[in-house]
Image (tube, coloured by chain):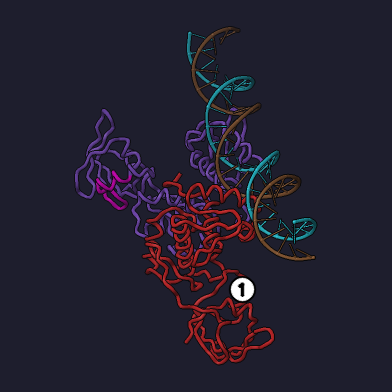
Chain colours: A purple, B red, C cyan, D brown
Amino acid sequence: MYLCSVATLAEEDYIKAIYSLSGIDGNPISTSSISGYLGVNPASVSGMVKKLSAKKLLEYKRSHGTSLTAKGKKLAIGIVRKHRLWETFLVEKLGFSWEEVHDLAEQLEHIRSEDLINRLDGYLGFPKTDPHGDPIPDKSGKIAQTGLISLSKLGSGENGVVGGVGNQDSKFLKHLNQLKVGIGSEVKVLNINDFDKSIEASIDGKKIFLSDKLASQILIFKD
Amino acid sequence: MYLCSVATLAEEDYIKAIYSLSGIDGNPISTSSISGYLGVNPASVSGMVKKLSAKKLLEYKRSHGTSLTAKGKKLAIGIVRKHRLWETFLVEKLGFSWEEVHDLAEQLEHIRSEDLINRLDGYLGFPKTDPHGDPIPDKSGKIAQTGLISLSKLGSGENGVVGGVGNQDSKFLKHLNQLKVGIGSEVKVLNINDFDKSIEASIDGKKIFLSDKLASQILIFKD
DNA sequence: AATTATTTTTAGGCAAGCCTAAAAATATAA
DNA sequence: TTATATTTTTAGGCTTGCCTAAAAATAATT
């Protein structure tokens, strides 16, 4: 209905899912993993992959998997850009907290207008990262490296500053809020438990315990 | 997928269309007029009306027409509120001009979140009207009267200030831009042509001619 | 009242996206 | 290699929302 419909809503969700699952290097993705990620039936994925393949947004080889074409990747990056800019808007301008914005941005990312998103980018001051520390692709699709590493990669005695999270789950983010861990928090690893890799750390001077699972999703700039 | 889906996108478009066509008093609307307004086949309207009627969003009596229930009207006003707040945002914050925003707002109005729209309202300073001079319903659904009347209702020698437009068509709005007619312009009717009701007027001191059709869509505060 | 015109509904189809169930292909294990 | 398990595809259905064509109802004319 609006402008040229490059891709339907459902198509965009598939493209984004494949992009997320592929990682930076663009590994081929299995039908079942897409199915699991999107919570749809594998049969539905088969059909959609065929359709998107015909549109040249991805390539599919049986028993090898699906990977995005340059065109598909460009579309995916555009969606990620929109998502992260909207998240930034919601937090910076409308005062939402970081655990509230993901689902809203999921809706807003489908708004079709290059012009709108570029203006929003400018309005926000061309931010480099979103509220979760994820990099925001620029207008041309370039993504700056953040230099973030997982807190669980730090050794005992090492320290850094929290710069992002590896997960958008609102339960996880609320938990971080409770622990008073946020972007900018100073972390020092005091001790690593050999048995379960759980970490004893000081966050902004306060001592806390973190499971390995939790620590792995906290991203930091190493000092 | 998100919150309870009170109405689908298509349903919302129907509700909004019926609301627009009904006017303030909520006149019953014929199937064919909805069909014409939305550019869909009358048969499609029949089906949708039946569906919305089952949802208690509207009432339908054959050969009498369709009118919104209180529930339907509330939904419609909510959509109008969202549309006008987004238009205001696009113009005030992102620097769009008034003829560019209608189609974008048509997309944004379907974003589902009460919280978001109330925060946006606050962020914009609880505006009373949108960039076209249309009143923005408040959180509770109340719509302030603007006191605007059509320029074509003015008599010769009378004057006022432009406060809005009765039409969102971008060709119409661009034409007004060319004539340097905008909200706040001071108008004085100099002469009304008896034959075709066209108007000779001065806008901010400059003399221009307006067809009746054009003048009828320019809304003013009468001095 | 009867004819004509208009409006509205019914009937039957189509495309998108999802589903389940069953078949086929591939991978793993014995 | 054969048997078992997993993954993937095909086949057939469902819902939403649109379409066209034809039938039916209502309104307007003569």
- Dot 1 falls on which chain? B
Horizontal side of B124 relative to A187 (left or right) equals right
Q: Name the residue at 55% across, 57% down.
A: B66
Which residue is disc 1 drawn over? B172
Name which quarter of the figure residue B118 lies in: bottom left
Name which quarter of the figure residue B193 lies in: bottom right
Q: Pinpoint residue B152: horizontal percent, then vertical percent.
A: 58, 82
Is residue A174 visible in the rendered structure shown here?
Answer: yes
B178 versus D23 height, above or below: below
Q: Name the residue at 48% across, 82% down.
A: B221
Q: Say which of B217 and B20 sits in front.
A: B20
As helix, strand or loop, the secondary structure at mark 1 comes to helix
Q: Pinpoint residue A25: horizontal percent, then vertical percent.
A: 52, 40
B219 versus B1 height, above or below: below
Q: Quadrant of the N terminus of chain A?
A: bottom right
Tell me, yes or no, whether the highlighted magenta stretch contains residue B183.
no
Tell me, yes or no, whether the highlighted magenta stretch contains residue A179.
yes
Q: Say which of B7 and B54 sits in front.
A: B54
Is residue A81 visible in the rendered structure shown here?
Answer: no
Q: Pinpoint residue A60: horizontal percent, then vertical percent.
A: 61, 35
Horizontal side of C29 relative to B179 (left or right) equals left
Residue extent of the magenta highlight: A173-186
Q: Pinpoint residue B85: horizontal percent, then vertical percent.
A: 45, 65
